[in-house]
Image (tube, rainbow, N blue to C red):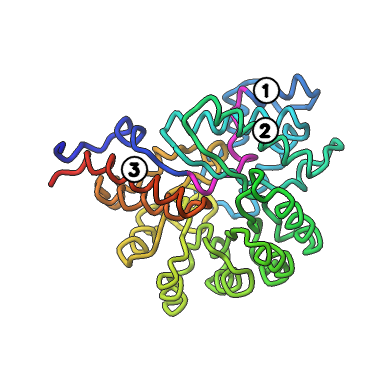
Amino acid sequence: MKSEMKISADFIRELPKTELHCHLDGSLRIDTILDLAEKDKVAVPTRDPEKLRKLLTVTENNISLPEYIKKFDLTLQFLQTPESLIRTAFELAEDCTRENVLYLEVRYSPILHTQRGMTPMESVDAVIKGLKQAEEEFKIKTGVIICGIRSISPEVSYQLAELAVAFKNRGVVGFDLAGVEENFPAKDHKEAFYLILDNNINTTLHAGEDYGPESIHQAVHYCGAHRIGHGVRLKEDGDLLNYINDHRITMEICMTSNIHTGSVKSYAKHPFKFYYDYGLRVTLNTDNRLISDTTLTKEYLLAHRYFNFTIRDFKEIIINGFKSAFLPHRVRTAIIRRIAEELDTYVSV
């Protein structure tokens, strides 16, 4: 048994991890964007990589969620062909592999990739193809989460839910509802989630990010959420918090993104440590690697810096990630047994 390891970027990078909340259209490489712009004849504001990065990443904290989402208008322009989706899905998995992510769930909304005539079904095929290519080349397992969009009609969410059903057991592992929460309640999309749950498909919803705990309540009680994306407002409702905790509904925490969208005012005030200490099943994720200029390694280092998290804490968070993965139970338990033994080698007696 090794003695307690010093927390560093290299050490965190070596730890086996999950990435459960990661948007494809928010996690592109700058060089790939420039290459796709040339290949697909898409206008780009600048061909200078650093200037383009500044345009696409959040450079100041506490902007609004709608302002943050506006960044996707640019990245989506380069994701309108099957080839671009195959490539970017593969590269995202490759980037995760470099951080020893063993299981990655990529989420995106097929309805946002039809500007050049690609059908939603073709887009799902492409994303799955790129991820499968990565699985063949790297030590990583992947799954796709299809997103409905709150500000787009519930009818479209239902069509996307049908798409998730069609691709169940073919690469799609879950269904999500993303986008601005205020004035776009989750309950309006409940028919889509009825279809998802009727077909025994996993659900995760963005909730409690830019709206209060009522949004989380709807995600759980109207839409049957198995996991909650962000959920930073949950602490405002103790009764709901206890329900979430008692039912082991996972919180997908993305700290840097929460600071950028103004959901939380500072890292020190982020509820992540409170949730962890309370016993909630919390995980750490990136949300958008490009737009928030982050990596999973950075997110873990932030937890160490602001909350003094140690390898013992990280072991629990990592195990939470594998427990919460949208994988079959037997697969999860086998992975957890192996990962727990590996993590134990880093922790002193």
Q: Quadrant of the N terminus?
A: top left
**Tag 3 or tag 2, which sits nearer the N-term?**
2
Q: Nearer the viewer, residue 307 or 57?
A: 307
For residue 34, which numbered disc appears in the image? 1
As drawn, 161 above or below 246: above
**Which of pointers 2 and 1 lies earlier in the amino acid sequence?**
1
User: Could you say where residue 174 lies in the image, as x and y percent from the top left?
Assistant: 61, 54
User: What's the magenta region?
Assistant: 19-31
Spatial CA span between label 3 and label 1: 38 Å
Residue depicted at 55% across the width and 27% down the height: 136
Q: CA distance from mark 2 to mark 3?
A: 27 Å
Relative to 53, is 271 above or below?
Answer: below
Question: Which image quarter: residue 225?
Answer: bottom right
Helix, strand or loop at label 3? It is helix
> Amino acid under label 1?
Leu
Q: Residues within 10 Å of mark 3 (few under 14, many from 20)?
A: some
Which residue matches tag 2?
Answer: 129
Q: Is residue 24 magenta?
A: yes
At 64% from the left edge and 56% from the top edge, which residue is drawn? 175
- Position in image of residue 172 (x %, y %): 64, 47
User: Which residue is labeled 3 in the image?
Assistant: 339
